[in-house]
């Protein structure tokens, strides 16, 4: 497996070559443009849902339901894209929009409690992205096989933990400590931020290999989608970490 991001793995190249359309091959510039388009869609959708929340005097009645179940739609879209990469040109924009709606609500809630936290989280996310991209391009960071396997295990463990926490929350059961603002909770959030950030390195590696392998054109959308998944995850985890630190002041 090339990357711990489940949407970006070497096996995808093999699946994507089946019935390849004669519409060209994957390029770095094309992937960058697609990433920009998806990011713009996500930010636009997030801005719209942000205004819906902040425009209310009190929390809208639908917000609790949206936060608890709203992530299901983008998750289902992500699963379809992951297993059928050819659907990425059509479904990746839908993923960006549906995910953006949830990100906007979450961001508005954090901003309501801690003024300026969203801008700080955005700046840190962008800073980490460009710092790791520079480190990768200069060869300072190169993912070894052990590095990849370790991230696969860590990312999978975090995903299963969050999934179990969500299921337990449906029954009113909360996991103490890790989600609090104590030092254990802060250390856990810091660990998740590091894992999310390191996934970016493997995403860059996937994109580079896809271009070198002459992957079909639709893989530009697929790679852009995978990178967006990691960036959103990193941003949300940074928000959580910052909120824990701010709540201790």
Image (cartoon, rainbow, N blue to C red):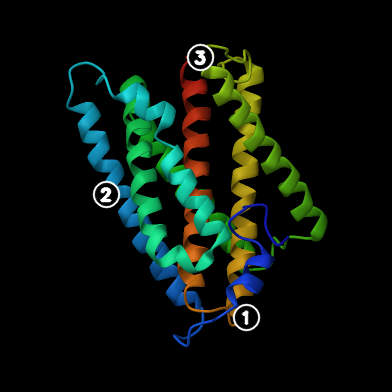
What residue is pinned by disc 1? 212
Q: What residue appears at the point 65 percent right and 43 percent down from the top-left corner?
A: 195
- Give the spatial CA distance, label 3 vs label 2: 32 Å
Residue picked out by circle 2: 44
Q: CA distance from mark 1 to mark 3?
A: 48 Å
Q: Say few, some or many: other residues with alpha carbon within 10 Å of mark 1 (under 14 / 14 to 19 / 20 or more).
A: few
How many marks the image carries: the answer is 3
Q: Which residue sits at x=51%, y=35%?
A: 238
Instruction: Give residue 144's position: percent from left, percent from top.
Output: 78, 60
Judge left or right: residue 239 versus residue 136.
left
Which mark is first along the chain, 2 or 3?
Answer: 2
Residue that carries the numbered disc 3 in the rendered image: 248
The answer to whether marks 3 and 2 mark residues whose Cβ atoms lie closer than 8 Å is no
- Callout 3: few (<14), some (14-19), or many (20+) C-alpha neighbours within 10 Å? few
| Disc 1 from disc 2: Cα separation | 33 Å
**Quadrant in which the N terminus appears:** bottom right
- The residue at 33%/32% (across/down) is 105
Measuring from the top left, give residue 198's x and y in whole percent: 64, 50
Question: Which mark is nearer the camera, 3 or 2?
Answer: 2
In the rendered image, residue 169, in percent from the top left (x then y), is placed at 53, 18
- From the viewer's perspective, tell me whether residue 4 is left or right of residue 94: right
Q: Earlier in the sequence, mark 1 or mark 2?
A: 2
- Mark 3 lies on a secondary structure that is loop
């Amino acid at each position: 497996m090339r990357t711990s991001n489940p949407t970006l793995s070497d096996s995808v190249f093999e699946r994507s070559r089946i019935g390849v359309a004669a519409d060209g091959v994957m390029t770095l510039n094309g992937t960058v443009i697609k990433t920009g388009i998806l990011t713009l869609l996500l930010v636009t959708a997030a801005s719209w849902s942000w205004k819906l929340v902040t425009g209310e005097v009190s929390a809208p009645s639908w917000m609790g339901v949206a936060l608890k179940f709203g992530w299901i739609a983008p998750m289902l879209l992500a699963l379809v894209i992951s297993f059928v990469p050819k659907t990425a040109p059509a479904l990746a924009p839908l993923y960006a929009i549906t995910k953006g709606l949830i990100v906007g609500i979450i961001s508005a809630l954090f901003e309501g409690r801690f003024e300026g936290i969203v801008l700080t989280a955005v700046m840190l996310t962008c800073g980490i992205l460009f710092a790791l991209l520079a480190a990768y391009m200069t060869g300072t960071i190169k993912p070894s096989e052990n590095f990849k396997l370790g991230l696969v295990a860590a990312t999978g463990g975090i995903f299963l933990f969050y999934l179990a926490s969500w299921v337990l929350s449906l029954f009113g059961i909360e996991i103490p400590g890790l989600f609090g603002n104590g030092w254990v909770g802060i250390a856990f959030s810091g660990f998740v931020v590091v894992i999310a950030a390191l996934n970016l390195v493997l995403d860059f590696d996937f994109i580079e290999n896809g271009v070198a392998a002459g992957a079909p054109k639709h893989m530009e959308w697929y790679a852009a989608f995978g990178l967006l998944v990691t960036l959103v995850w990193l941003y949300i985890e940074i928000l959580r970490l910052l909120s824990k630190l701010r709540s201790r002041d």
